[in-house]
Image (cartoon, helix red, strand yellow):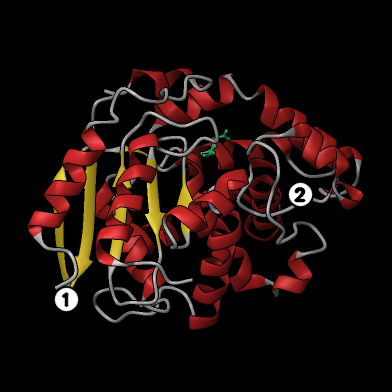
Amino acid sequence: MIYSEEVLQKTLNLGKKYLHEGAVADYIPELAKVDANKIAISVIENDELHSVGDSKVKFSIQSVVKVILYSIAMDNYSVDELKKYVGVKPSAKAFNSVIELELSDKSIPVNPFINAGAIVIVAILYNIYKGETFDIILKKARAFLGDDVDYSREIAESEKESSFTNRTLIYLMLSRGIIPNDIQVEEVLDTYFKACSILVNTENLAHMSYVLSNNGKNLKGEEIITERESRILRSLMATCGTYDYSGDFAIRVGLPAKSGVGGGIVTASNKNTGLAVYSPRLDSHGNSYCGVRMLEFLSKELNLYIY
Ligand code: DON
């Protein structure tokens, strides 16, 4: 047993000491309404789910969904084909940086886990699935996370109303021909906002972590993604999953991971386990403040580093 009840509780208590640090994302007004003192860890080990803290509390998945979006893109195209529209390079600026997009080669987003990259991926999916796109995304999200997940209409609407930076990114990409200019811009953005607004808890994210760590198979042994896709996603999580903090995260925690401004972090490992954390106050890079500290502590305590 790697994750004893004692070590999980010790980690949660350590995390609680940092609850006052960081700030809840408020550039999306609906996100500012959450209870900032929630904190949780969920793990899957030996086919069983264990949690400590507020593991039933739902929050929006936000950028963690970008892993799922890229997996659907890989069902349709090779990474080399996708690289014409979105790269696989680490980012050096904030997750919604306009200047990084402007300065990147041909204004191709550097990777699929920053906002510009995920918006391109949604545009690519929209070209294939048209009005069905969000249904396809939700179906795949349920396969990763659990059948009961749905999205928050309030958060999706709030994202739309405060979408100035994301609009800047999509119009810049339209002007550079990265996204074809006959695309339905509003439909693409609405689909992206809905995807970011999918509600999850750490239990859902632990299931996603298990799929990523277990070469694409869920607890029932069903193939959610291929082994190759899981390897590519873990690689991208390692290099790009916590944005411009990814290098620090790799040193501190030593596991591939993907964060979201909702406060969730999903990890991946090379063991048949799942591990996810939540706490909504964020550091300056947009990663859960307590979440990173809890993962760092757990990693040291249990020697989880895989690099
Ligand atoms: O588009 C946005 O800004 C959000 N829906 C997602 C950003 C996000 O989660 C970045 N994460 N740390």
Instruction: Tell whether 220 sits left or right of 293.
Output: left
> What residue did someone put label 1 on?
46
> What residue did someone put label 2 on?
109
Instruction: Tell whether 110 sits left or right of 205.
Output: right
Callout 1: SS: loop
- Identity of the residue drawn at 32% across and 59% down: 299
- Identity of the residue drawn at 41% across and 73% down: 224
The N terminus, quarter of image: bottom left
Ligand 1 is within 8 Å of the C-beta of the residue at disc 1:
no
Q: Which mark is residue 118?
A: none
User: How many numbered marks does the figure carry?
Assistant: 2
- Amino acid at the residue labelled 1: Asn
Instruction: Residue 127: give x, y in percent of width and height.
Output: 71, 56
Instruction: Residue 65: give x, y in percent of width and height.
Output: 48, 50
Give the CA separation, mark 1 to mark 2: 39 Å
Instruction: Residue 9: give x, y in percent of width and height.
Output: 12, 48
| Closer-to-camera residue (27/99) | 99
- Identity of the residue drawn at 46% across and 25% down: 25
- Amino acid at the residue labelled 2: Pro
Q: Quick check: can you spot residue 301? A: yes
Disc with the residue nearer the chain's start (1 vs 2):
1
- Identity of the residue drawn at 32% across and 68% down: 210
Instruction: Tell whether 58 sits left or right of 71.
Output: left
